[in-house]
Amino acid sequence: MLTSFLKTFQELVYVERFPASKGVLQRINPQVKLGCIVAFILSALAVRTILPLAVLLVALVILCFLSKIPLKFFFVRATVFIPIFAAAIALPLLFITPGRLLAEVGYAGLVAKVTIEGVYRAVQFTFRIWICVASLILLVLTTKFSRLIQVMKSFKFPNVFITMTAITYRFIFLFINEAYRMALAKESRTVVKEPRMRAIRAFAKMIATLFIRSYERGERVYLAMISRGYSGTVKSSSKMKIGLKDWFFAVASMVVCLLVLSVEYLPLGGW
Amino acid sequence: MDEVAVEVKDVKYVYPDGFVALDGVSLKIMKGERAAILGPNGAGKSTLLMLMSGLFMPSRGEVNVLGVAVDEKNLHRIRKSIGLVFQDPDDQLFCPTLWEDVAFEPLNQGLPEEEVSTRTKEALRSVRLEGYEDKPPHHLSAGEKKRAAIATVLAMPHEILILDEPTANLDPISRIELIGLVNSLRKNGNMTLIIATHDVNLIPDIADRVFVLSRGRVITEGSVRNVLLNSRIMGEASLEPPIIGRLFRLIAEKNKGVASEAIPLTLDEASYEIDRLIRRCKLNKS
């Protein structure tokens, strides 16, 4: 089970075939792309109703289609991690938001009232988070990681943050592979079904071993870095040109954002 | 008089957990030499290379590189003159793409972008990895990773190139390619090569002199032939003479006077010797 989980995690997180395909977003300058995605996210955060978010959803789906990313994969990838967590966080909103009564949930005298406004706020909150996450996922799926790092550099992100991100990305798969090999080795030596407690203990030991291994590798990588002149800062060369298609994409994105904001302020009965 | 590239004087190194990796190691490697540090696993080879590169400081003794003592104030100079290729390329390649990894050192030394680009391209070309610039290191095969790791140190002109177990985990073809690559590097200049390995079959192809390290001590040093064919020394270091040498020694023992005194150690030498023996047999028959 552990091995299949690690394999699925790797397949879901590690997707490099899409940035290499020739879709619309893949051809856009990463700096412009990041700017537009940030504008999408800010628009999503600025609205309090669901309809404007639906406009953004349509825009994301169209971009996804034009960038040759399978819609099913995109929806799974955008939903599995953060939005599910966000939905859990939004649960109390069902009960604490004052408004018209929808249902009563309770047992033995302890009753919580679910309001229509509460349901609306919980759905809007989760949907908003989903749009933000999906926008970022679209950026990641259509941009090579090295280009993202370059964009961060060009936007003057702190050097420590960039170095840590780059090294994390470089080594996360190595460690997932290492964990996967350890899990396989354990499974190959597990002949009979082991008691739950023993399995948990073995899992804990594996985590500890992985921690020690990653610590030791960290030391070796640091030595390799300083042997090649590393002194605290990583210098880089990055030049990216902004062309006509990038300007066109930027204008189109701004139109979408304006549309989202104008829908928010149109009299559509609160939706 | 020959100049000394690396001199290690009575060095002891103790790890923080108290393990004594090296004790009383002394050796001298000359400029332009191809020196192999031969020893079994755990003999202290990697630790010795770390000391030579100034990544570790000795607990006792002294290390000099190109006449300069390896200490805190000379570290920049030492690291500039030494290119170290780690045993595991996954330690060496830490950037998201191969290009960034190879360009890491030239960029860190503050070279202009055009020169960085030229050097990076040239380094990748010399290890035959042109076209791999945008590849993430985890997409490379073991042989490609090893060549990429070498490219990272070729991007700057180092006077000394140190390779830690260069053939570890390589398939036969990658191994042959790597030997060719290492030898081609030396043809381009007077680079000093230091190779740590336990692969006795590799040494005749890429080294002129051998230092045998066992349990943290240098137990002998000398020419490749003298050291590798010395069964007593090899046994003491838990090693065996190269397979070609063992085969010809066996033939020589069974057929007194047939084989020549110089036992071959490489394929070329073996093929020459077999050819010589065949011609001699034909001559005797006629």
Image: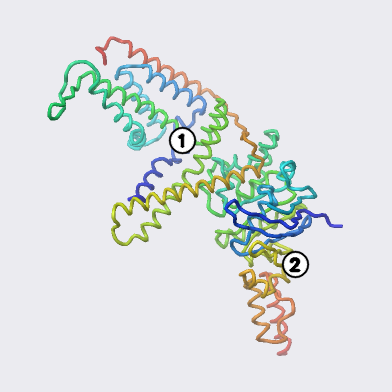
Give above or below for B34 relative to B286: above
**On the image, numbered disc 2 is attached to which residue?**
B222
Q: Is residue A256 left or right of residue B234?
A: left
A253 sits to left or right of B260? left
Circle 2: element type = strand
The residue lying toward the viewer, choosing from A129 and A227, is A227
Residue at (42%, 54%) from the top-left corner? A182
| Chain letter for the residue marked with disc 1 in the picture | A
Q: Amino acid at mark 2?
A: Gly
- Relative image position of residue A227 (x, y in whole percent): 66, 45
Residue B246 percent across, percent down from the top left: 64, 76
Q: Position of residue A13 (x, y in %)?
A: 41, 40
What's the coloring here? rainbow
Query: What's the residue type where badge 1 is placed?
Result: Lys
Q: Position of residue B142 (x, y in %)?
A: 54, 54
Considering only vertical position in the picture, is B141 above or below A98?
below
Marker disc for residue A22 = 1
Q: Nearer the viewer, residue A74 or B46?
A: B46
Q: Nearer the viewer, mark 2 or mark 1?
A: 2
Residue nearer the viewer, A206 or A78? A206
Mark-to-mark CA distance, 2 and 1: 59 Å
Q: Residue furthest right?
A: B1
Residue count near mark 1 (Cα–Cα under 10 Å), binned few <14, some 14–19, many ≥20: few
